[in-house]
Image: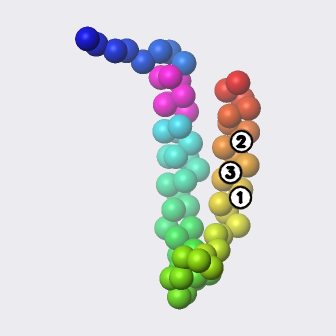
């Protein structure tokens, strides 16, 4: 039995890949450097995330709204 992705699913995958390539990959190294700087002890119970994460979440929300 062969299954095919719907056009909607293919579009979603393409948009996701494009978002990763344009928004996440360019800042990944800088993001993790900031994360390690904010969390020098490595104690995950007090872990803090760089502000850039909230910016990315907002961009993702906007992308989702545009899809719907």
Please state the horizontal and vertical placement of residue 63, each as a whole percent of the image: 68, 36
The answer to whether the residues at label 2 and label 3 have Cβ atoms under 8 Å apart is yes
Q: Name which quarter of the figure residue 30 lies in.
A: bottom right
Q: How far apart are marks 2 and 1 (CA)?
A: 11 Å
The answer to whether the residues at label 1 and label 3 have Cβ atoms under 8 Å apart is yes
Local secondary structure at mark 2: helix
State whether residue 52 is above or below residue 46.
above
Q: Give the range drawn in magenta.
A: 9-15
The answer to whether the residues at label 2 and label 1 have Cβ atoms under 8 Å apart is no
Local secondary structure at mark 3: helix
State whether residue 7 is above or below residue 22.
above
Q: Can residue 34 be seen in this view?
A: no
Q: Name the residue under label 2.
A: 61
Q: Name which quarter of the figure residue 27 lies in.
A: bottom right
Verify whether residue 24 appears in magenta: no
Q: Quadrant of the N terminus?
A: top left
Label 3: few (<14), some (14–19) or many (≥20) C-alpha neighbours in 10 Å: few
Q: How far apart are marks 2 and 3 (CA)?
A: 6 Å
Q: Mark 3 points at which residue?
A: 57
Please state the horizontal and vertical placement of residue 14, each as a whole percent of the image: 49, 30
The image's mark for residue 10 is: none
State whether residue 33 is above or below residue 7.
below
State whether residue 27 is above or below residue 67.
below
Please state the horizontal and vertical placement of residue 37, each as a whole percent of the image: 58, 82
The image's mark for residue 54 is: 1
Q: Quadrant of the C terminus?
A: top right
Q: Distance between the residues labelled 1 and 3?
A: 5 Å
Verify whether residue 10 appears in magenta: yes
């Amino acid at each position: 039995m062969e299954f095919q992705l719907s056009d909607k699913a293919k579009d979603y995958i393409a948009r996701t890949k494009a978002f990763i390539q344009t928004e996440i990959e360019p800042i990944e190294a800088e993001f993790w450097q900031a994360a390690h700087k904010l969390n020098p002890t490595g104690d995950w119970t007090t872990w803090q995330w760089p502000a850039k994460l909230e910016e990315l979440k907002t961009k993702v929300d906007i992308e989702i709204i545009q899809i719907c």
